[in-house]
Each structure stands twice: as structure tokens, then as C-alpha cells.
Image (spheres, rainbow, N blue to C red):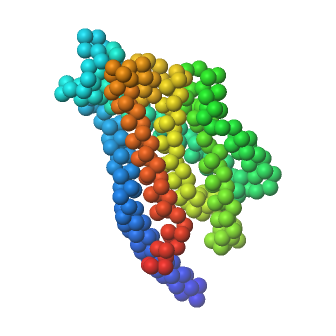
Amino acid sequence: MNESNGGLEAALRRRYERLAGRYRSTRNSRAVAAFCASPLNLAGLVIVATVTIAAVLGPIVAPYDPASQDLANRLQGPSLAHPFGTDQLGRDVLSRLLHGARLSLGIAVAVTAIRLVLGTTIGLVAGYAGGWVDEFLMRLVDVQLAFPGLILALVIAGILGPSLRNVMIALAVVGWASYARIVRGSVLSTKERDFVRAAQLMGVSRFRIAIRHLLPNVASPVIVLATLNMGTVILGTAGLSFIGLGAQPPTPEWGTMLSAGRYHLRDAWWIANVPGVAIMLTVLGFNLLGDGLRDVLDPKHDTAIEKTA
């Protein structure tokens, strides 16, 4: 009798896994189709992909050394030899732009990863533990959110001193609270669902419930926030470098390039405009991509897929 029940249970489990796999496949296909249906989503994806390729291959395909000076050819306009012209020291703007792409994107990835891990961990613990743990952690979040992010980053970077490492620390410190608040709210609603209660009744450990059941169900808003934060971090890094608290010359960072070019706006507009346009397009690309992912990963979108599946 026990063997027959075990066989029936195994058969039902296999059938459930097949149906769940088919559902996930259908949902993913419809989500990709919905994302590709919007020209703005595709535009954001293309921009982000282009910047990523430039960051990966830039130092390889750059025609010149970004730090190499040629004073005889300083302030030369765009030409075949220098497609984006040269700066006040005769350095090739295109080469510096390509090397700066790797620097800016690398900083954005690192800072966003730190924010994501720290904020998600705090939000997950606060939402699932509840009680005084939740109160204590959320008060820390409230204190952090009470300060304007850019001003707090400016203060931290000013205290630590001008360098890219200190800019990364400053931007990471001021951005984790948003993740914590979003994750906590998602956990509070998810932990009351039937599959979590069933796991608790089966004696599953709290750690396993948090990692196996809660974390995957709060991933969607975190992914969207991380995508949007990429553009914000790039903008913040460039802003701090622009006022001298980030990368220091001759580092080819977009904010530093923009700062140096502001003194030559009349006689060499390309020095400031080229990195400025690069920053604008990159931030725009991540914002468009984040908006597209938000529309696709929205719970209402999943509900619509379930009705049509």
C-alpha cells in the first residue's frame, strides 16, 4: 500500500514538474515578446549593449593610448585620424571615451552589486524576522533615506578624499536603503502565501524558506531597481568626478573629460560634448531598459499571461 502511494505521489510530482516547466516556458516566451513589442525597450537594449561592447572591447580597438599627449595636434577638430577630435593636451578623445566606458560601466556594476546584496539582505531579514529586528533595521533605512543621496555621497567622498574607490564607497553607502525597503515590502506579502506556510508546517528551516521561497519571489522589483540604478550610478560618478572628487587626471573618466572640456566650449566644443552625449545616452539606455523590464516583470503582467496561457 505504501509503495503504491509512493508511486502515485512520484507520478503526480513528475506531472506537476512538467506542467510547471511548460507554464514557465510559456510565460517567458510571452514576456520576451511583450518586451520586444516596444521600440523604446529595444532602443534601451541596443544602447546598453553598445556601451557594454565598447567597455569590453574599447581598450583593444582604441586607436591611440588614452594618456599619450601630442601638443602639436592639440584642440584638433574631428577628422579621419581623430574621429572625435583631440583635447587640450592632444590626446585622442575617442580613445579616452572608449577607455572611460569600461571605467564608468565597471564602477556602475560594482556599486549596484554592493547596493543590491546589502539592501536585499537587510530587507529579507527585516521582512521575514519581524518584531524588534524589523523595527531596528527599518529605522536604519529611514535614517539613511532622510539624507539627500547626492549630498550625502558628496560629504562622504569629501571626507574620504578624491579617488574612484572613495566615490564607489560613497555611492554604495547612499543607495542600499531603497533595495531594503522594496524587498521588505515584497517579503511581508509573500511570506503569508500558502506555499510558505506549507513549507513552515513541513518543518523547513527559516533560512531555507528565505532563500528557496522568498528570495526568488522578490527578485523582479530588485532587478528593475538595479537596472535603473546603473544609470544613476554612472551619472553620480561623473558628477563627483566633474567637481574633482572622483577620478583624477589623466584617468580617462567621462566626468573628468567633461570637466576638462568646459574651459574650451567655444574653441573646442567636442571635448565636453562627446563625453556629455555618452553619459546622456548611457543613462537614457538604462532608464529605457529598466522601464521595459518593469512592465514585463510587473505582477499584473504575469496575471495577464496566466489568463491567456
Q: Quadrant of the N terminus?
A: bottom right
- Residue at the farthest left position: 80
Give the residue drawn at x 52%, y 44%: 229
Q: Quadrant of residue 56?
A: top left
The image position of residue 30, as x and y in percent, is 40, 69
Query: Is 32 in front, or is 81?
Result: 81
Give the residue drawn at x 56%, y 85%: 5
Relative placement, left or right, of 240 versus 280 is right
For the question of whether residue 202 can be seen, the reply is: no
- Residue at the farthest bottom position: 1
The image position of residue 123, as x and y in percent, is 66, 51
Q: Quadrant of the C terminus?
A: bottom left
Give the residue drawn at x 43%, y 45%: 284
Give the residue drawn at x 38%, y 46%: 48
- Residue at the farthest right position: 132
Q: Is residue 207 above or below residue 253?
A: below
Q: Quadrant of residue 194?
A: bottom right
The image position of residue 85, as x and y in percent, is 27, 24
The image position of residue 201, as x and y in percent, is 70, 71
For the question of whether residue 227 can be seen, the reply is: yes
Relative placement, left or right, of 25 versus 4 is left
- Residue at the farthest front position: 266
Relative placement, left or right, of 120 versus 97 is right
Q: How many marks?
A: 0
Relative placement, left or right, of 132 versus 250 is right
